[in-house]
Amino acid sequence: MTNYWLMKSEPHVYSFDDLMKDGSTHWDGVRNYQARNFMRDKMKLGDIVLLRLMSRVKK
């Protein structure tokens, strides 16, 4: 069964262009333990990932 995952990143840390260039990546620096455990225990090759790039608005 294919699972769907929503991942987020800061564009200045790891951008969509970085992902396209690399082809795949190791996601580290996850501070939320539940999210980390899902990534470690539940994510499998072939799952679908939507990458949301978070950007900060400068005031």
Image (cartoon, rainbow, N blue to C red):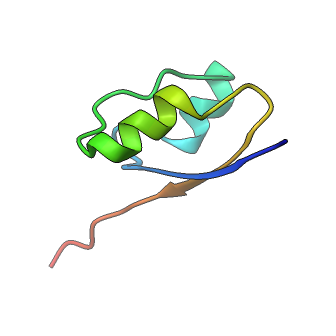
Q: Position of residue 4 (x, y in %)?
A: 70, 52
**Residue 36 falls in image quadrant:** top left
Q: Position of residue 20 (x, y in %)?
A: 67, 31
Number of dots carrying numbers: 0
Instruction: Please say whether residue 32 is visible from this viewpoint.
Output: yes
Judge from the rendering whether residue 19 lies leftward or rightward of residue 8; answer left or right: right
| Quadrant into which the N terminus falls | top right
Q: Residue at x 80, y 31 (%)?
A: 46
Judge from the rendering whether residue 51 lies leftward or rightward of residue 10; answer left or right: right
State the residue in front, 14 or 41: 41
Q: Residue furthest left?
A: 59
Q: Position of residue 10 (x, y in %)?
A: 36, 49
Q: Residue furthest right?
A: 1
Instruction: Please say whether residue 14 is visible from this viewpoint.
Output: no
Q: Residue at x 75, y 38 (%)?
A: 47
Q: Residue at x 81, y 43 (%)?
A: 2
Residue 21 to residue 42: above or below:
above
| Quadrant into which the C terminus falls | bottom left
State the residue in front, 17 or 54: 54
Q: Position of residue 35 (x, y in %)?
A: 39, 45
Residue 18 to residue 25: above or below:
below
Residue 32 to residue 55: above or below:
above
Judge from the rendering whether residue 15 lies leftward or rightward of residue 5; answer left or right: left
Q: Residue at x 63, y 23 (%)?
A: 24
Q: Residue furthest bottom?
A: 59
